[in-house]
Amino acid sequence: MTTTLAPAPSGAGTGTTSEPQLVVEHVHRRFPSPEGGTVDALVDADLTVRPGEFISLIGPSGCGKSTLFNLIAGLDTPTEGRILIDGVDRSGQQGLVGYMLQKDLLLPWRTVLENVVLGLEIGGVRRKAAQAIARPLLSTYGLGGFEGRYPAQLSGGMRQRVALLRTILFNRDVILLDEPFGALDAQTREQMQEWLLDLWDDFQKTVLFVTHDIDEAIYLSDRVVVMSARPGRIVASFDVPLDRPRKPSVVTSAEFVRLKADARELLNGAHRTHDVQETR
Amino acid sequence: MTATADAPVVSTGPTPAGAAQDSLRELGRLRASMLPVVRRRRGTAEPSSWSVNLLRVGVVVAVLAGWETGVRAGWIDPFFWSQPSRIWDTAVVAFTQGGILADVRFTFTSTVLGFVIGVTGGVALGLSFWWSRRYALVAEPLVIAFEAMPKLALAPIVVLVLGLGMGSKVAMATALVIVIQTLNTYAAVRSVDQDLTTLLYSLGASRWQVFRKVVVPSTLPWIASSLRVGIGLALTGAIVGEYIGSNAGLGRMIHYAGSTYDIALIWVGVFTLAILSMLLYVVVSWLERRLLKGLAHTR
């Protein structure tokens, strides 16, 4: 038993009894502004994530999504509040969650296989042993035959697969995906969504997923969190009660369309409050 | 103030459609009156290598022949310029009886030593700047000041301190190479992709792991491509050291020949130096290609 008790799930939670995997607790992040004052990048963010949950964050640019991810990944420390992972305060600690940034960020001088094992390697696993673990996974997850290729020889979709597999092979329960499919064409993007859901199913990860695309957010997630900009904060969240596994055709169902309309409403609300503050 | 700020309607005078119509009509008129220009590109094929080589040799032979006939016809004063035939005779004597081979070996050794020490030291210094921002900020202007200083002007001091032997020549070569190598490596270090280092830190990597897995591999192509500049500088440093004061070396030989008005011997020294320099350049280029081949997938 850990001595630190996780707080009760805040409003957004669905009220399950399982201990939350990740808790973002009253987190503020202020940066000094160039004019000498401070800028609120994130204000009073509260988020409770159950194990195995798939959560999407949507919101306009500048809403603090990346700031939130950097805080959870421990690359940045909250000005106020704390980040709990498995009930332990992990604010400012790195290496506890898998983090995939917008760019694929593969090391150009390493082959696919060598790139995928990077996380394990840094964690102290022998290179040979790590590669033995990774090799079968590469062929299962659509990268068979590409083990010896270099990133420059791969298409955008393939590179993104390698980056995602690297994040998963880092072997942490929580993975953060910051617009991983933002730069892909629509068709590749659909394939990648399917692929991601397969991986999520097989590896039982807890996923936080940033996207600009409402369809993508609803299609993939158990819960969608809506953020607004200036200052960045969480304004609303709603559950996606669609059955799993989901087929791509679900996007035309009445339920999906209704959720989408709601999400758009919430997002527009987020924009409106922001506009009102601007013109005040 | 309300948030509904309609864009003011800007009146655009005479209808733009009318002006655009005029332009279209004008373009149509020009098209009818202008002569059509159709050309075919010629001579884009790469010239054959034998013809290029033949021309290269031809240029050298023509220059030497012109020089020789110029002297024989009395247009060129052989006292100042010497002549190819005499230079050749002097070269044969220098290589068969004189000690020019020992001089070549001396210059070659001091150049290579200076190059290796300079490159190693420069790379180590440049990479070390990655570890501490404060240290880098303190050191950088000092390195640039040393770079701006004409280091060749230091040669007399270096020779006085380190003597007439090889030490002072190696030191001169090193001094020239190390500065440029440090600055090049530091530039490479600064251009390391910040997102890549962020990624590694997010994976829980230590600074040493980031250094070994990202910083060093990212900088290698930069280092490889600065080697060719380095070898030229090393040779320059060694030769200047020999000019100032030395007991051996091609630089000393040329300096000595100059002070005895042995112009032919100067030319022998200069040509030998040119050949040596070309050889070093070829070897270093090969080395660079080998290094870059391992990193060919970088971009």
Image (cartoon, rainbow, N blue to C red):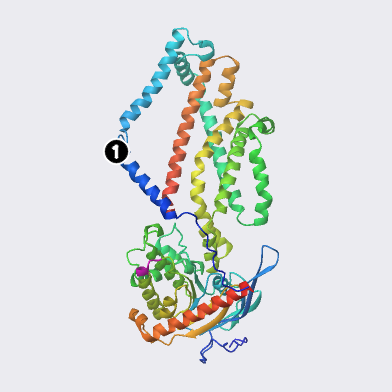
In the rendered image, the vertical position of residue B96 relative to residue B147, given as above or below: above
Residue A64, percent from left and from top: 57, 72
Q: Nearer the viewer, residue A141 or A237?
A: A237
Left or right: A94 with respect to A125? right
Q: Residue at x 61, y 42 (%)?
A: B179
Q: Residue at x 56, y 18 (%)?
A: B257
Per the rendered image, the range of residues in magenta is A184-188
User: Is residue A53 shown to the viewer in this render?
Assistant: no
Q: Residue furthest right?
A: A36
Counting the numbered discs, the total is 1
Q: Residue furthest front?
A: B14
Image quarter of residue A134: bottom left
Residue type at mark 1: give it. Val
Circle 1 packing at 10 Å, graded few (<14), some (14-19), many (20+), is few
Q: Nearer the viewer, residue B171 or B294?
A: B294
- Magenta part mainly helix, strand or loop? helix
Q: Is residue A69 magenta?
A: no
Left or right: B9 with respect to B65? right
Residue A211, percent from left and from top: 47, 73
Residue A147, percent from left and from top: 36, 63
Q: Which residue is mark 1?
A: B38
In the rendered image, the vertical position of residue B230 relative to residue B74, given as above or below: below
Pinpoint the chain carrying mark 1: B
Q: Residue at x 39, y 23 (%)?
A: B59
User: Is residue B26 shown to the viewer in this render?
Assistant: yes
Residue A114, percent from left and from top: 42, 63
Kind of element beneath mark 1: loop
Left or right: A198 with respect to A79? left
Q: Nearer the viewer, residue A104 or A2?
A: A104
